[in-house]
Amino acid sequence: MADWDPDLYHRFRRYRDEPVAMILARLALASDARIIDLGCGTGEHTVELAQRCAAGSALGLDSSAAMIDRATALRASLPADLQARVAFARADFRDFAADREYDLIFSNAAFQWARDHRDLLARCFRALRPGGLLVIQMPANDRETAQLTIHALASEASWQAALGTIRTPSDATVRAPAEYAAMLAEIGFTDIDCHYHVFRHPMDGPAEVVEWSRATVLRPYLDALPADRHDDFIAELTRRLEHGYGTSGPLVFEFRRLFLWARSAAN
Ligand SMILES: C[S@@+](CC[C@H](N)C(=O)[O-])C[C@H]1O[C@@H](n2cnc3c(N)ncnc32)[C@H](O)[C@@H]1O
């Protein structure tokens, strides 16, 4: 798949940061916490986490060269003390394996791109120190107009051959909170809290929802289409969304996200 576009992704940064602000408001960290951020993107949250523990450290992993380049540049801009406590590496978190090394495993808007969540969560369990915390946020917005419309359009005759088997990450990989709660308990986690929260993002119109989607859920669709069909697909999707939302003007884009909190028992 084509690499991520950090600038496009950050176009709606204020909205995309809202779930992280919710997590940070609830997060208590020891001053010497060891942290890993799986799918760290451009690294701002990794740095923010390190800033919250004066003697702690944070490692951000991401498989995208473009994202890790940005994160590395961000690290270079940090004051020396903070820079020494933050590291970034290009790596696939599906290969993540550690033995009782971390006090916090954090992942924001990244796990949905991986498939075998049970295996990943079990690795996270092994990687946590006793009493360590797992906090994951994943988009779970496959029932909202935009993703339903993308899926319906991709299934139509003109697009079906190229796009018919593609599903959005939320639809393909993200399960219901109760399923994760059962999975986490079975793995051995305690203090489990899995829940949805719906964010409400004012947008200028459906074209902005398409722009939002182009940075994330539309990536596999556009990747599967020849470049000379991109504009037609985007134009048709925008037209369908104007119909779906009943407006070409301002609207509130509702975005459901799934939060997983769980702890490794202290012993
Ligand atoms: C939507 S961005 C979120 C980035 C960051 N966590 C944030 O909140 O701004 C998803 C990130 O997950 C990364 N990612 C997806 N699958 C990955 C994998 N298997 N291993 C490592 N990184 C992955 C992507 O490269 C991308 O940077």
Image (spheres, grey):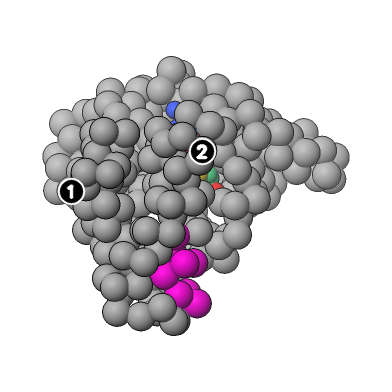
Residue displayed at 29% across by 29% down: 115
Can residue 13 be seen in the rendering of this structure? yes
Q: Magenta stretch: give its range.
A: 202-210
**For discs 2 and 1, the disc positioned in front in the rendered view:** 2
Can residue 191 be seen in the rendering of this structure? no
x and y percent of residue 213 in the render?
Answer: 44, 54
Q: Residues within 10 Å of mark 1 (few under 14, many from 20)?
A: few
Along the line of sight, the residue nearer the viewer: 115 or 1: 1
Residue 12's quadrant in the figure? bottom right
x and y percent of residue 165 in the render?
Answer: 24, 34
Q: Amino acid at mark 2?
A: Ala
Q: Which mark is residue 227?
A: 2
Q: Amino acid at mark 1?
A: Ala
Which residue was labeled with disc 1? 176
Left or right, residue 67 beside residue 22: right
Left or right, residue 108 beside residue 147: right
Residue displayed at 26% across by 52% down: 153
Say if 256 sits above or below 52 in the image.
below
Task: Let me know if residue 230 is in the magenta part.
Answer: no
**Mark 2 or mark 1: which comes first in sequence?**
1
The answer for how far apart the CA atoms under marks 2 and 1 are is 35 Å
Along the line of sight, the residue nearer the viewer: 264 or 139: 139
Say if 16 sits above or below 254 in the image.
above
